[in-house]
């Protein structure tokens, strides 16, 4: 199925009929959510931590230009190169140019959402470059030709049998479903890729402005190998992934790992401050930091500015009832779940992602767990308002709300409509409920029964009881 070509409803319908996904997503969601809850309880006064980190992130976003200037100056002082990319295509061109100037052909990559956002692999492979994903989940998806379905657990929807088939094809021999055997193959194959790579590409969890340091958080150690074995390391970051000092990094890491997986700290936290220095035993000969805008500057001046506080922990996905039922691929974009429903329309436009703000029950669970207190469900409502004002509402919905607006603003019409509503729905009602409504009602009754309108309106009942009119 072409995820981009189909609409959200078609993708969601397919996900709802995917029995493996229906088992896998709730299992992983519950595990990650319970881990976050336990970590929050152990931390204590978690609301104070959330409030403080939210204030720090907002202050950083409000002063982004000065922090970026400080970061760039310190990276250069450390011997690194800094590149600013206004658009996704600019970032891809910079990577291509670095590869061409150095005669590089083989690239290893660590997990990075920003490189997914700019579709880096696709463009580099079109230029004849070999790109190998080294995060185990991302490696599985690369073999399957799929995109991540979760920020933290990109291949959570895959069965072990499916992975064994993918690895068997890559190995050229039959592999069992034994986890140790599958991991041993991946380790053997990826080690070879690390040793042969000319360039290592990573994302950036945080960049520390005061020292020009890129910080990477991982559990597999592949990011550390990606940065240290190839002669060239390219780190790519969204322009908002910055903290002023190591003190703020301490707080951000504390909340990131607890919110993401429930860990006090991830297995590996790597800080890289430029290329190999004299006397260093390892490290790249060149270090390049690419800072990507790709629409983020436009968000700064809007009501959606707070979405830039996101630290990509995925906690909002782990509590979202919509994500639980449809998984990540149904969103059809790089970022899924509540954060994707807010961010994707901003990065890709309503023409591509206008359905996503409606992929929410607006229960507010995402907002309650966000470690930086992004008001996600409020921003989803803001998107819906903007879509209406910009004319993206379906014609039938426009007509329906227009009719309701006319009716609600004309009491005589409203009263008449209320009186005939019960009689008008008798054909589809049984025992006081409508279970198979016509037209627009069908969307509602496909999932739940609709109570039939009462035969007597409240106004008439009130009048009958002698109630006074509230002037």
Image (cartoon, grey):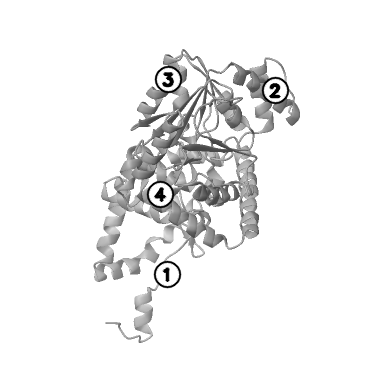
User: Percent position (x, y) of residue 212?
Assistant: 46, 37
In front of the other: 460 or 131: 131
Separation (CA) of disc 1 from disc 4: 55 Å
| First in residue order: circle 3 vs circle 2 | 3
Question: What residue is rendered at 55% in x and 30% in y?
Answer: 110
The residue carrying pointer 3 sits among few (fewer than 14), some (14 to 19) or many (20 or more) residues within 10 Å by Cα, namely some
The residue labelled by disc 3 is 98
Q: Is residue 354 visible?
A: no
Q: CA distance from mark 3 to mark 2?
A: 31 Å
User: Residue 469's quadrant in the figure?
Assistant: bottom left
Instruction: Classify residue 190 as left or right of residue 344.
Output: right
In the rendered image of this protein, does residue 425 appear above or below residue 224? Answer: below
**For the point 25% across and 62% down, which residue is it?**
406
Disc 1 on helix, strand or loop? Answer: loop
Residue carrying label 2: 185
Residue 72: give x, y in percent of width and height. Answer: 39, 35
In the image, 305 versus 341, the foreground residue is: 305
| Mark 3 / mark 1, whichever is N-terminal | 3
User: What is the crowding at mark 4: few (fewer than 14 residues within 10 Å), some, or many (at least 20)?
Assistant: many
Residue, disc 1:
454
Q: Which residue is mark 4?
A: 60
State yes or no: discs 1 and 2 in contact (Cβ < 8 Å).
no
| Mark pair 1, 2: CA separation | 66 Å
* Residue mark closest to the camera, 1 vs 4: 4
Q: Are marks 3 and 1 in contact (CB under 8 Å)?
A: no
Label 2 CA crowd tier, 10 Å (few <14, some 14–19, many 20+): some
Is there CB contact under 8 Å for labels 3 and 2? Answer: no
Instruction: Pick the quarter of the image with the C terminus.
Output: bottom left
How far apart are the two marked residues, 3 and 1, measured between alpha carbons?
71 Å
């Amino acid at each position: 199925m072409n995820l981009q070509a189909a609409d959200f409803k078609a993708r969601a319908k397919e996900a709802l009929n995917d029995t493996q996904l229906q088992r896998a997503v709730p299992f992983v969601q519950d595990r990650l959510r319970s881990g976050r809850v336990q970590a929050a309880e152990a931390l204590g006064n978690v609301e104070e931590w959330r409030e403080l980190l939210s204030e720090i992130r907002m202050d950083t976003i409000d002063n982004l230009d000065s922090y970026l200037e400080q970061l760039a100056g310190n990276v250069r002082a450390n011997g690194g190169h800094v590149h600013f990319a206004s658009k996704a295509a600019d970032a891809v061109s910079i990577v291509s140019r670095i590869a061409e100037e150095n005669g590089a052909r083989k690239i290893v990559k660590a997990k990075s959402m920003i490189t997914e956002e700019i579709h880096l692999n696709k463009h580099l492979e079109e230029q004849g470059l070999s790109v190998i994903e080294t995060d185990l989940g991302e490696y599985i998806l690369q073999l399957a030709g799929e995109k991540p379905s979760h920020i933290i657990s990109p291949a959570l929807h895959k069965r072990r049998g499916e992975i064994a088939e993918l690895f068997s094809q890559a190995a050229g021999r039959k592999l069992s479903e034994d986890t140790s055997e599958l991991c041993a193959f991946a380790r053997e194959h990826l080690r070879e890729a690390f040793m042969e790579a000319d360039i290592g590409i990573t994302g950036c969890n945080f960049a520390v402005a005061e020292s020009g340091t890129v910080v990477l958080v991982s559990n597999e150690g592949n990011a550390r190998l990606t940065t240290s074995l190839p002669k060239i390391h390219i780190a790519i970051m969204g322009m908002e992934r910055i903290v002023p000092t190591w003190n703020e990094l301490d707080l951000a890491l504390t909340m990131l790992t607890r919110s993401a997986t429930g860990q006090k700290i991830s297995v590996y936290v790597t800080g890289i401050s430029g290329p190999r220095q004299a006397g260093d035993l390892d490290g790249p000969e060149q270090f390049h930091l690419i800072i990507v805008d790709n629409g983020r500057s436009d968000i700064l001046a809007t009501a959606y500015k707070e979405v830039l506080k996101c630290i990509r922990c995925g906690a909002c996905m782990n509590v979202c009832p919509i994500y639980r039922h449809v998984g990540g691929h149904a969103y059809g974009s790089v970022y899924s779940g509540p954060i994707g429903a807010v961010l994707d329309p901003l990065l890709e436009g309503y023409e591509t992602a206008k359905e996503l703000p409606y992929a929410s029950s607006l229960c507010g669970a995402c907002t309650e767990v966000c470690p930086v207190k992004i008001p996600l469900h409020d921003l989803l409502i803001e998107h819906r308002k903007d879509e209406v004002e910009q004319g993206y509402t379906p014609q039938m919905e426009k007509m329906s709300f227009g009719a309701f607006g006319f009716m609600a603003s004309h009491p005589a019409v409203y009263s008449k409509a209320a009186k005939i509503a019960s009689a008008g729905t008798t054909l589809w009602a049984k025992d006081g409920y409508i279970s198979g409504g016509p037209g627009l009602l069908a969307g509602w009754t496909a999932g739940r029964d609709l109570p039939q309108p009462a035969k007597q309106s409240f106004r008439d009942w009130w009048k009958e009881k002698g109630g006074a009119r509230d002037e």
